[in-house]
Image (cartoon, rainbow, N blue to C red):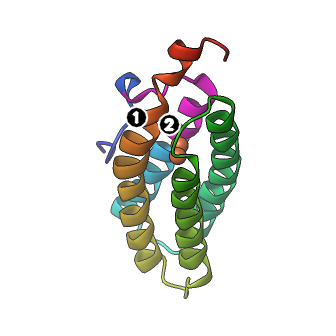
Amino acid sequence: MMPLLSWRAEYSVNEAELDRHHEEMFNILNSVYDDVMNSPALGFILPNIDKLTTIAECHLSAEEQYLEKMHFPDIADHIAKHREFTQTIERIRSGYNDNDLEASKQLIIVLGEWLIHHVLKEDRKYSHLKGSRGTA
Ligand SMILES: [Fe+2]
Ligand SMILES: [Fe+2]
């Protein structure tokens, strides 16, 4: 099956570790989508939510440290968006009610929007910082 949304080199933020995290989030989206389309059996969504929570925790803190190091201008606003995303994922996790299809649907929408509006837009605002400062 075609992946829903694949990470591409042109999405790079010019920082290998952060790119790897982003790619991992694209993979989780595709894996949830794939599960829903191929095996609507119960029991697949919680491990995916947990995986996303783990990678997001690691990624967001690494990214925030990077933004600080690079003196990114709108850092408070950027961090607020991270908190909002984390809380939304937590809400899906805690609102899970034995309905994998419903939770999967929510996760696909939230994560898909996050990748398109945050990772491909907001995060790319810091992609040029490296060359300009030359310290990373
Ligand atoms: Fe990011
Ligand atoms: Fe970000």
Q: Is mark 1 within 8 Å of ligand 1?
A: no
Q: Is residue 44 visible?
A: no
Where in the figure is residue 37, as x and y percent of width and height? 33, 61
Is-magenta flag for residue 27? no
Q: Is residue 88 visible?
A: yes
Badge 2 crowding class, 10 Å Cα cut-off, few under 14, some 14 to 19, many 20 or more, is some
Q: Amino acid at mark 1?
A: Trp
Badges 2 and 1: C-beta atoms under 8 Å apart?
yes
**Quick check: 14 left or right of 71?**
left
Label 2 secondary element = helix
The quarter of the image holding the N terminus is top left
- In the image, 113 versus 43, the foreground residue is 113
Q: Which residue in the structure is indicated by mark 2? A: 23
Label 1 secondary element = loop
The region drawn magenta spans: 11-24
User: Which numbered disc flags the more N-terminal residue, 2 or 1?
Assistant: 1
Is-magenta flag for residue 22? yes
The structure residue drawn at horizontal position 40% and vertical position 22%, both measured from the top left corner, is: 9
Q: Which residue in the structure is indicated by mark 1? A: 7
- In the image, 10 versus 67, the foreground residue is 67
Where in the figure is residue 23, as x and y percent of width and height? 50, 36
The structure residue drawn at horizontal position 57% and vertical position 24%, both measured from the top left corner, is: 15
Q: Amino acid at mark 2?
A: Glu
How far apart are the two marked residues, 2 and 1, measured between alpha carbons?
A: 5 Å
